[in-house]
């Protein structure tokens, strides 16, 4: 029972991550119709916002380490600690949550630049060309990050206070062994908040209404004299911010490296398509569905019956869903079907 | 013979292609690409891309899992080497056929959907195959290490005909070892045949119908065509090309690894095709040349090689050039590749062939319309 | 009489959700005639055509072509049986040349629903080429036949549509407003073409708004209003039918 | 545009002449490598230089490791050519190296990217052999790649000096006459860890394995299991995890309720960084089970992994081939030389690659010929010291180096950013030795 409860939590947590990554992609891919292979790179850039912020915050005074004689080695003492003492240490400790503040404007800017500088010229080009140009862009972004930060993962821990695990079992009067890391719970809550915010934005604001209308029928909305293009630029910016935030918040769970975006790229496309093209709710639903199924498929009891099922479950589910539902879970007709 | 018939322009194209491929060891010498392994890779990936283009270029169905057939072709070939004979003929035939068989199954299922849904289905099949081959199917695939030919494999046919293998077993074509240059020429001949078949398909009513399906599949149905079998045939043919390419990889180097089926490998052939020009005849070959060249040559530059290269310059300039070029070569070769993708697609819409054709046409604005029915070369 | 009925629509109903698009439609199309279906917007004309070509399945009732039930068959089976359709909004192959656009349906006629012939050459298909050129000649498109069809004018696209239908020489050709969007001159030319090929014995069903076209072509006219046939007869009968006038002109007159 | 000035020589040239336009009557003759007693692949005797091929991952997850290997190789080349301070050339005993290249010929090198993929690694190695005329290939940072390249080198008649490869298979069932491994292996990790685990954790333990689901993971799991079960530990479960799973939570939560009190992570690289980080997040490092402190063991450590895992590495036990903090003469000379060149200490991957290069060069000097058969003979059974791991022997039966193994622990109080691992024990070579026959395999012959 505990095991199942924990797997549900794992599933939700994974699902939250998948949904968050897929959300931005489906905004761009499912609705603007741009096959954006650079979406993973946006996720990665978000994660590196946290890394960069950490580097800035821990900018250190170098004190020569006399104990090492083979070469010049330095101990590093962050200036923040030198200047502010305890407060400085705390600020460094809180670097991941704080870097959200940095990530929002930075990612928005990156999104806008990307759309205005490149993507806008590709709305009318073939999907094949969109793939090539965004894939090229993704590689270039990756390589730039690699040249600055190396290829090795960089530890970006959560604040000390939430680094451990919450004893949920005790909280709900269940067994003591139901513990779950605070940060993963925070991530889940964060995912819900961001997803909710994006939905609310599209549902309840005039801007969102126009965007939704534009997604459904771009031509008509343009004929109404509304500048859809400009709104789409902003949608792209929002997608970049969502992807970036997903990246920032994921860093304590997965120490980021330059390749982390590529690792998530295929998965995020699968989630979006299983959810159904052009459907935000579908992408979110598919994210959680795949997350939970993946967690359960990894249980020893299941693996004993189907060896290796955890290796393929995501793709197996994708095949089953796409064969039983022609447009994924909640896809709209005619979007990216040709 | 009727089966070899081609229009005059196509005959020139075909001859030009064959000569260019066969003479690669000569004209690639100045750019440092004329060594057997890379030449083999050019031919093999050219074949892969040309086959992929029959599906993607003609029907517009973008498969994101074609590497699975590459893998199946390789594994089957190595198994044929192990069980039957080191002769490459049965190995290539089996590899191609089994890939075709898998293509029938995967194609039949995936073609029930169109557009991105189709792409994700093919991707899913390939990723499942890759993941399983890497882990639980290790008894068949030898997992991470890759399936290899061993000296004490049974090789029933070789035993029957008394062929004795000395040293490490190497694929042979009736006694000619398929490594080094003979291996390249074998691949080159297969490639040229593959190109010829592709050319004929492009020029056939079958090809025209496939193009029409790409253009407007619904209309094809109301025009009286059952489009599904057409698509399936295109899928299977291109799957067999991939299987054959996989076979050739194992022929020239008797090892089959699971990575060959990973999505990055499927993505590579997509990129090759788009880079060269989707739906053009020689575009995919050019794309394959370009990507493989960058992968093998640009990654090999290191700082000392760069200094050698620029040593004719004054030392200040030499150092400057090395500093400028260095990020793009060696461990930075991906950067060059990414930049190349972007530059080509931005400045040459439609890929290399189409982009250059357009530029050419714009210059002499009185473009003569194609006399040949069927897509342009 | 029964033996020369090509298309026999019997008791066809079609509902979309709660909306009754066709109610108990009965229609017999005679061999070799031009049969026009007219009616106000939303009367169900296009729905009826879509039922005939297999795009839609009727809620109840049957459609027989040449005595055989074709309801439930796939669009390509119906086409191969001998029913071709000319679409109202041009449904061409925009990436192909005009000539190729016409050769495709000709190939369908000759090769059937599927044939695997990757080693034939298009350049050897002289018969198909001749047929296509002949039809293009008829439609006045022969001079530009090597141009890409995607960049044609809308009127030319309509003529290409017609050519694609005609090249198959179907037993029954369904034309959905063949002259919509054409200039007066083009319309007249099209009428002439249709009259000219009438003698070849092809049965046609025409949906048309343009009364000039209808009355210059049709042997027989059926009037559809609110999903039901309200009148049927030769042009002169229909012209004087008060029910038709009411349905068409509504309360305005 | 060409990279290497050297002419393709040896069999490549001959092949061109013989088969250049596909005309030669070649039936019967072994074509790939035209060798006989006096001719061998890429014989440098007639040139002024000898070319080594450094085949390391430059892209992908192990790019940093590859970069460090490359630094070590470049340093080794410098030292061999008599530049720099000579590094371990001064401490190696016995040494026939003279600091004037190899057999008086200047050492040059070519580089390539393995991408940590067998296909790419073999393609790169082939380029070095076919085009650049490399006489030896070395490098790599995964066992799959090492095994793939090693068998290629066997076919090509070129010596392969393995870089970082830890699987038992490399010198076990996939060993080759032309392949040599200085790095230790999973079996030795297990054997070295055993006594330390017993001393630290006792005999009554339950181990839970998370194992990367591919050949290296399996061999390590098996080796560690054998050791721990020999100590009287029970194996609670051994769960396979997909390579590159990223998030391991679904494999970690079952550990919480399993009753196990030791978690063994048979992961390497990114997988290890992620699984360790996440295990610690799930509170496993601070947990109490069966009235004992829960423990995590990572059998194979590297400094780069420790860097990636950050704080989470503290107190975690594992093994490494070598660590820069060793104080023997050889290690000090190498660290000093490397540190002076690059500003930071070398990793264990750098160490093994540096040593391999020197050993190869030395073997040529001993043999007095570039002929691989002679070189192999000189390497087989070669005993040496002063290279950082104490007295070492290249065992002739399987081409595996036998030397001391380091059991390390994540440093609780690192004094610098490089001081991540603390050496708990230098397990003597005698304790990790095994019979070469247990892993099977066949070296084959030198043709």
Image (cartoon, coloured by chain):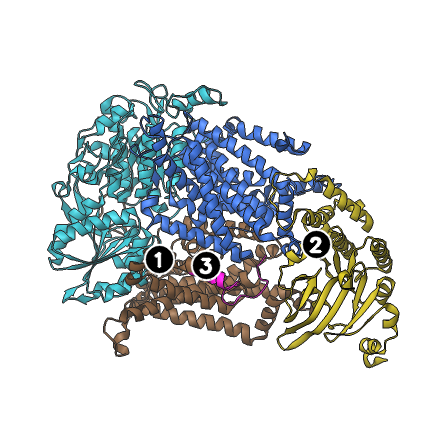
Please tell me which residue is depicted at 35% across the width and 44% down the height of the picture.
Answer: B141
Look at the image and give the residue range highlighted in magenta: A317-338
Q: Colour of chain D?
A: cyan
Q: Which residue is mark 2?
A: C92
Q: Are marks 2 and 3 in contact (CB under 8 Å)?
A: no
Percent from the top left, x then y, of residue C57?
A: 63, 67
Percent from the top left, x then y, of residue D227?
A: 15, 50
Task: Evaluate whether label 2 is on the same chain as label 3.
Answer: no
Q: Which mark is residue A309?
A: 1
| Residue A324 part of the magenta segment | yes
**How far is mark 2 from mark 1, CA to CA?**
46 Å
Residue A287: name its quadrant: bottom left
Please tell me which residue is depicted at 36% across the width and 37% down the height of the picture.
Answer: D55
Q: Residues within 10 Å of mark 3 (few under 14, many from 20)?
A: many
Q: Which residue is mark 3?
A: A319
Disc 2 secondary structure class: loop
Q: Are marks 3 and 1 in contact (CB under 8 Å)?
A: no
Percent from the top left, x then y, of residue D223?
A: 20, 48
Please tell me which residue is depicted at 32% across the width and 19% down the height of the picture.
Answer: D36
Name the one closer to the observer, A144 or A67: A144
Read off the chain for label 1.
A
């Amino acid at each position: 029972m505990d095991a199942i409860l924990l797997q549900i939590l794992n599933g939700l947590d994974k699902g939250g991550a998948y949904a968050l990554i897929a959300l931005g992609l489906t905004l761009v891919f499912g609705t603007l119709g741009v096959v954006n292979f650079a979406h993973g790179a946006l996720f990665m850039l978000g994660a590196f916002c946290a890394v960069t912020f950490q580097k800035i915050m821990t900018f250190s005074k170098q004190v020569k380490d006399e104990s090492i004689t083979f070469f010049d080695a330095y101990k590093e003492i962050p200036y923040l600690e030198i200047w502010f003492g305890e407060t400085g240490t705390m600020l460094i400790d809180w670097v991941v949550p704080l870097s959200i503040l940095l990530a929002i404007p930075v990612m928005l800017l990156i999104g806008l630049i990307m759309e205005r500088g490149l993507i806008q010229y590709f709305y009318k080009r073939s999907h094949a060309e969109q793939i090539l140009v965004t894939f090229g862009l993704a590689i270039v972004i990756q390589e730039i990050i690699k040249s600055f930060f190396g290829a090795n993962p960089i530890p970006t821990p959560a604040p000390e206070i939430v680094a451990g695990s919450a004893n949920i079992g005790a909280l709900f009067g269940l067994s003591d062994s139901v513990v779950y890391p605070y940060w993963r719970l925070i991530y889940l809550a964060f995912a819900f908040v961001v997803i909710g915010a994006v939905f609310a934005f599209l549902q309840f604001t005039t801007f969102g209404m126009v965007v939704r209308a534009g997604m459904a029928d771009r031509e008509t909305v343009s004929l109404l004299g509304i500048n859809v293009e400009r709104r789409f630029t902003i949608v792209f910016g929002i997608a970049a911010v969502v992807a970036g935030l997903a990246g920032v918040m994921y860093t304590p769970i997965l120490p980021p490296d330059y390749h982390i975006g590529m690792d998530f790229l295929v998965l995020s496309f699968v989630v979006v398509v299983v959810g159904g093209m052009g459907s935000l709710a579908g992408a979110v639903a598919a994210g959680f569905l795949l997350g939970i199924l993946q967690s359960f498929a990894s249980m020893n009891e299941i693996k004993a019956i189907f060896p290796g099922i955890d290796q393929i479950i995501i793709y197996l589910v994708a095949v089953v869903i796409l064969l039983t539902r022609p447009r994924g879970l909640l896809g709209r007709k005619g979007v990216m079907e040709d | 013979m009727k089966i070899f018939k081609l229009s005059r322009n196509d005959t020139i194209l075909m001859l030009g292609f064959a000569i260019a491929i066969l003479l690669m060891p000569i004209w690639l010498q100045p750019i440092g690409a004329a060594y057997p392994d890379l030449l083999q890779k050019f031919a093999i990936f050219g074949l892969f891309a040309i086959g992929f283009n029959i599906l993607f270029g003609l029907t517009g169905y973008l498969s994101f899992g074609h590497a699975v057939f590459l893998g199946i072709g390789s594994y089957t070939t190595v198994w044929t080497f192990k069980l039957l004979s080191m002769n490459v003929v049965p190995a290539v035939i089996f590899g191609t056929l089994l890939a075709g068989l898998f293509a029938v199954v995967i194609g039949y299922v995936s073609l029930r959907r169109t557009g991105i849904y189709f792409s994700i289905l093919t991707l899913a099949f390939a990723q499942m195959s890759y993941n399983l081959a890497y882990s639980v199917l290790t008894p068949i695939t030898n997992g991470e290490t890759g399936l290899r030919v061993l000296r004490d494999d049974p090789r029933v046919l070789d035993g029957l005909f008394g062929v004795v293998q000395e040293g490490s077993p190497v694929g042979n074509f009736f006694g000619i070892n398929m490594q080094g240059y003979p291996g390249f020429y074998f691949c080159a001949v297969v490639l040229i045949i593959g190109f010829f078949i592709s050319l004929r398909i492009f020029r056939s009513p079958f090809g025209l119908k496939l193009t029409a399906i790409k253009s407007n599949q619904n209309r094809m149905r109301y025009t009286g065509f059952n489009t599904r079998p057409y698509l399936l045939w295109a899928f299977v043919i291109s799957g067999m090309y991939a299987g054959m390419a996989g076979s050739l990889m194992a022929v020239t180097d008797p090892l089959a690894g699971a990575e060959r089926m990973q999505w990055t490998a499927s993505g590579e052939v997509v990129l090759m095709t788009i880079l060269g020009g989707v739906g053009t005849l020689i575009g995919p070959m050019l794309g394959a040349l370009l990507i493989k060249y960058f992968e093998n040559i640009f990654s090999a530059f290191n700082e000392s090689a760069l200094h050698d290269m620029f040593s004719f310059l004054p030392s200040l300039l030499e150092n400057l050039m090395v500093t400028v070029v260095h990020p793009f070569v060696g461990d930075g070769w991906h950067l060059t590749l990414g930049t190349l993708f972007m530059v080509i697609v931005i400045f040459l819409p439609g890929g290399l062939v189409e982009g250059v054709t357009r530029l050419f046409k714009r210059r002499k604005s009185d473009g003569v319309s194609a006399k040949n029915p069927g897509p342009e070369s | 009489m029964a033996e020369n009925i090509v298309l026999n629509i019997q008791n066809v109903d079609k509902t979309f959700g709660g909306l009754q698009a066709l109610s108990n439609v009965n229609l017999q199309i005679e061999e070799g005639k031009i049969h026009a279906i007219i009616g106000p917007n939303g009367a169900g004309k296009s729905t009826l055509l879509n039922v005939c070509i297999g795009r839609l399945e009727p809620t109840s009732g049957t459609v027989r072509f040449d005595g055989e039930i074709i309801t439930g068959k796939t669009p390509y089976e119906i086409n191969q049986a001998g029913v071709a359709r000319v679409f109202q909004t041009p449904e061409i192959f925009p990436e192909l040349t005009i000539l190729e656009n016409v050769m495709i349906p000709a190939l369908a006629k000759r090769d059937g629903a599927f044939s695997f012939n990757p080693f034939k050459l298009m350049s050897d298909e002289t018969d198909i080429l001749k047929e296509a050129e002949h039809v293009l000649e008829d439609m006045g498109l022969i001079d530009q036949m090597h141009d890409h069809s995607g960049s044609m004018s809308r009127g030319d696209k309509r003529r290409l549509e017609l050519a694609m239908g005609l090249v198959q020489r179907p037993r029954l050709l369904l034309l959905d407003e063949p002259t919509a969007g054409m200039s007066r001159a083009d319309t007249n030319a099209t009428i002439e073409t249709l009259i000219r090929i009438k003698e070849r014995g092809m049965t046609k069903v025409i949906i048309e708004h343009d009364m000039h076209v209808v009355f210059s072509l049709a042997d027989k006219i059926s009037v559809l209003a609110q999903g039901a046939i309200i009148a049927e007869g030769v042009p002169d009968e229909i012209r004087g039918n008060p029910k038709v006038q009411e349905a068409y002109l509504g309360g305005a007159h | 545009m060409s990279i290497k000035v050297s002419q393709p020589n040896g069999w490549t040239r001959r092949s061109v002449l013989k088969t250049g336009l596909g005309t030669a009557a070649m039936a019967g003759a072994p074509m790939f490598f035209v060798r006989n007693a006096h001719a061998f692949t890429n014989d440098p005797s007639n040139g002024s230089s000898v070319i080594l091929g450094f085949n390391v991952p430059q892209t992908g997850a192990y790019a940093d490791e590859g970069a460090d290997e490359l630094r070590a190789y470049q340093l080794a080349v410098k030292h061999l050519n008599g530049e720099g301070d000579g590094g371990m050339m001064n401490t190696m005993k016995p040494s026939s190296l003279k600091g004037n290249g190899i057999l008086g010929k200047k050492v040059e090198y070519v580089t390539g990217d393995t991408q940590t993929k067998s296909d790419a690694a073999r393609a790169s190695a082939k380029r070095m052999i076919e085009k650049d005329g490399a006489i030896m290939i070395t490098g790599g940072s995964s066992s799959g790649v090492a095994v793939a390249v090693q068998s290629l080198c066997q076919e090509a008649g070129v010596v392969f000096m393995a870089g970082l490869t830890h699987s038992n298979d490399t010198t076990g069932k996939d060993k080759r006459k032309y392949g040599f491994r200085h790095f230790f292996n999973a079996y030795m990790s297990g054997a070295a860890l055993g006594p330390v685990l017993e001393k630290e954790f006792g005999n009554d333990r339950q181990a839970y394995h998370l194992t990367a689901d591919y050949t290296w993971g399996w061999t390590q799991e098996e080796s560690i299991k054998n050791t721990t079960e020999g100590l009287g530990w029970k194996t609670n479960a051994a769960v396979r995890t997909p390579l590159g799973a990223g998030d391991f939570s679904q494999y970690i939560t079952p550990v919480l309720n399993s009753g196990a009190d030791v978690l063994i992570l048979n992961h390497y690289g990114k997988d290890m960084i992620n699984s360790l980080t996440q295990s610690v997040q799930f509170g496993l490092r601070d947990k109490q089970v069966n009235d004992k402190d829960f423990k995590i063991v990572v059998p194979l450590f590297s400094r780069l992994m420790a860097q990636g895992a950050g704080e989470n590495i503290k107190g975690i036990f594992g093994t490494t081939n070598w660590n820069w903090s060793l104080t023997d003469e050889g290690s000090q000379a190498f660290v000093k030389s490397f540190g002076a060149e690059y500003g930071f200490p070398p990793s264990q991957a750098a160490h093994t690659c540096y040593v391999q290069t020197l050993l190869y060069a030395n073997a040529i000097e001993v043999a007095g010929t570039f002929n691989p058969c002679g070189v192999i003979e000189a390497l087989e059974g070669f005993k040496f010291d002063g290279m950082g791991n104490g007295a070492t022997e290249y065992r002739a039966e399987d081409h595996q180096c036998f030397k001391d193994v380091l059991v390390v622990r994540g440093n609780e109080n690192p004094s610098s950013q490089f001081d991540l691992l603390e050496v708990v024990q230098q397990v003597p070579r005698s304790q990790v030795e095994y019979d070469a026959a247990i892993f099977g395999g066949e070296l084959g012959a030198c043709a």
